[in-house]
Amino acid sequence: MGDRPVLVGLLLYVAIALAPTVIVWFGVRILPAVVTSFLERRRPAGAAAGPCLESVVADLRRLHRQVRDCRPPTRVRTVALLSAYDDTLLEACAMVGVDAPLATATGSDRAFTRMLTEAALEDAGIALDPPGPR
């Protein structure tokens, strides 16, 4: 009978010593998975994952103005700007369903196919240089 309080005390000590570890493990491993699962179930099934067409067209027009800018930027800026413009141009073509010759172009052909892709987008109804307010 004298051993019982020692055994209870030992079990209580082990529970107190392991409780922080178990709580932290639960918070790091289990809780994020439960929250993510809950949020995924609440999200509508038809929600688009990417940006809307209006924001892509706004980015495309902004980049188009920067590409056509008269001031000569540095070579690094030119390459980065053209790369961003080409990516946005291809994204807009994919959203509208227009065939983009720029997707398969390489090297010196990119400038010509960029113009063909711009023309295809404008034929689809997306004006890259819309008339401004008067």
Image: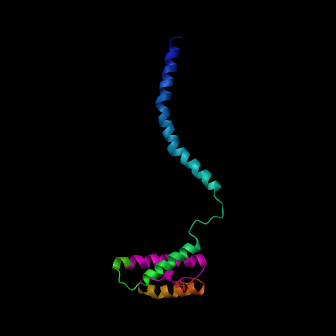
Please state the horizontal and vertical placement of residue 18, each as a whole percent of the image: 48, 32
Relative horizontal placement of residue 82, taking residue 125 as reference (left or right): left
89 vs 105, nearest the viewer: 89
> Does residue 130 sit above or below 13 in this rendering?
below
Figure colour scheme? rainbow
Q: Which residues are magenta?
A: 78-107
Q: Which quarter of the picture shows residue 131?
A: bottom right
Q: How many marks?
A: 0
Q: Residue furthest front?
A: 134
- Where residue 9 appears, as percent x and y from the top left, is 49, 20
Image quarter of the C terminus: bottom right
| Position in image of residue 73 (x %, y %) | 35, 80
Against 29, is 43 above or below? below
Image point (54%, 82%), residue name: 100
Q: Residue visible at 44% across and 86% down?
A: 111
- Say which residue appears at 49% left-offset and 87% top-offset: 115
In the image, farthest residue toward the right: 45
Is 55 covered by the magenta stretch? no
Q: Is residue 93 magenta?
A: yes
User: In the drawing, does residue 18 fall left or right of residue 73?
Assistant: right
Residue 121 percent location from the top left of the image: 56, 84
Quarter of the picture holding the N terminus: top right
Magenta span: helix, strand or loop, mainly? helix
Q: Residue at x 37, y 77 (%)?
A: 77
Foreground of the two, 110 or 88:
88
